[in-house]
Amino acid sequence: MTAHILGALASVVTFVFVFWLMRRGVLREKYAVLWLIVSGIALLLSVIPGALSGLSDLLGVETPANLLFFATTVLLMLVAIQLSHELSRHEARIRRLAEETALLERRLREQQQCQGDEAD
C-alpha cells in the first residue's frame, strides 16, 4: 500500500511541477502535454492497484514490473528521438539564419563602400 501512495504522490508532484514550468514559460505546451499524460497514467496506475497487473496479464507479460520498465524505456527512447529531431531542425534554422545575416552584412558593407566612393 505504501508504494501506491508514494506513486500517487510522485505523480501529483510531477503534474504540479509541469504546470509550474508552463506558467513560468520554461516548458512549452507542446512538450508539457506528454509529461501531463504520463503523470496522469502513473496516477491512475497507482490509485488502481490491480490495473498494472491486469494490463500485464492481458498483454502476456509475466511480471507487471517488466511491463512498467519496458513502457518507460520505450517512452524515454521516443522522447530522445523527438528531441533529436527538434535539435536537428533548430541547427538547420540557425545555420540558415547565420548565412542570411552574413549576406546582409556583406551587402551593407558594399553599400557603405559605394557611398564612401561617391562622396570622394
Image (cartoon, rainbow, N blue to C red):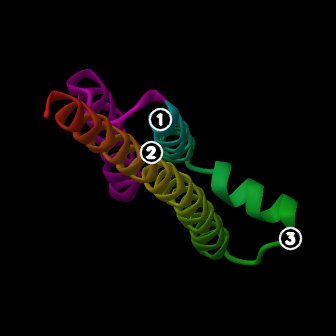
What x and y, as percent, mark residue 48?
57, 41
Q: Earlier in the sequence, mark 1 or mark 3?
A: 1
Asked where in the image residue 112 lies, by quadrant, the reply is top left
Q: Is residue 111 left or right of residue 95?
A: left
Residue at position x 53%, y 44% in the image: 38
Q: Amino acid at mark 3?
A: Gly
Of 40 and 117, the residue lying toward us: 117
Residue at position x 40%, y 32% in the image: 28
What x and y, as percent, mark residue 37?
55, 37
Q: CA distance from mark 3 to mark 2?
A: 56 Å
For numbered disc 2, what is the local secondary structure?
helix
Q: Which residue is mark 1?
A: 36
The majority secondary structure of the magenta stretch comes to helix
Q: Which residue is mark 3?
A: 60
Q: Earlier in the sequence, mark 1 or mark 2?
A: 1
For numbered disc 1, what is the local secondary structure?
helix
